[in-house]
Image: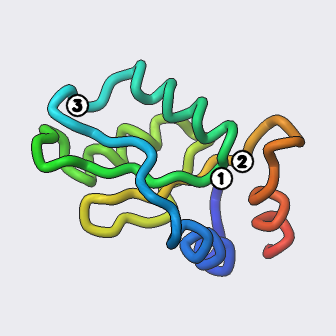
Amino acid sequence: MDLKGKQKHFLRSEAHSLRPLFSVGKNGLTATWLDQLTGALEKRELIKVNLLQSADATVAEAKTFIEKNPRITVVQTIGHTLVLFMPATDPDNQRLSKKVAALV
């Protein structure tokens, strides 16, 4: 999803109070980890991911790996933290995606 400036600003403000839900450690980035991340995004739509100091991957590598799934958008990277957004397919979970779509 290609987000405009207003949409990214809204998502960054919504993510401000969130704590990282996923971490990347010494096990690195795997397909199983990405599947779990996608499942969590399907329920929440907006999450933070933290790269631990023991992680073999850099923030840029993690961003590239996550964006292999075309539905996931990296909204922002701050230090070792990434803010991710993915619109939910279930209408019951579309709390944020409806607001983001209205900001066009």
Quarter of the figure with residue 7: bottom right
Q: In this view, does 83 lie to the left or right of 97?
A: left
- x%, y% of residue 19? 44, 58
Mark 2 touching mark 1, by CB under 8 A? yes
Say which amino acid is labelled 2.
Pro
Q: Which amino acid does label 3 sit on?
A: Gly
Residue 103 rendering spot, x and y as whole percentages: 80, 75
Q: Residue 30: x, y in percent?
A: 33, 24
User: Which corner quadrant holds the C terminus?
Assistant: bottom right
Mark 3 Cα within 10 Å, few/some/many (few <14, many 20+)?
some
| Sooner in the amino-acid sequence: mark 2 or mark 1 | 1
Q: Which of marks 2 and 1 is in front?
A: 2
Q: Is mark 2 on a helix, strand or loop?
A: loop
User: Which image quadrant for residue 41?
Assistant: top right
Residue type at mark 1? Answer: Met
Label 3 vs 1, first from the N-terminus? 1
Q: Label 3, on which residue?
A: 28
67 lies left or right of 61:
right
Rounded to the nearest angstrom, the CA distance separating label 3 from label 1 is: 25 Å
Q: What element carries label 1?
A: loop
Query: Is residue 37 depicted above or below 13 in this figure?
Result: above
For the point 76% across and 66% down, the residue is 100
- Residue annotated with mark 2: 87
Element on which disc 3 rests: loop
> Residue 1 bears which disc, if any?
1
Q: In this view, does 99 lie above or below 40?
A: below
Question: How far across and down, in percent of the image, does residue 78 sit?
Answer: 33, 69
Residue at x 88%, y 41% (from the top left corner)? 91
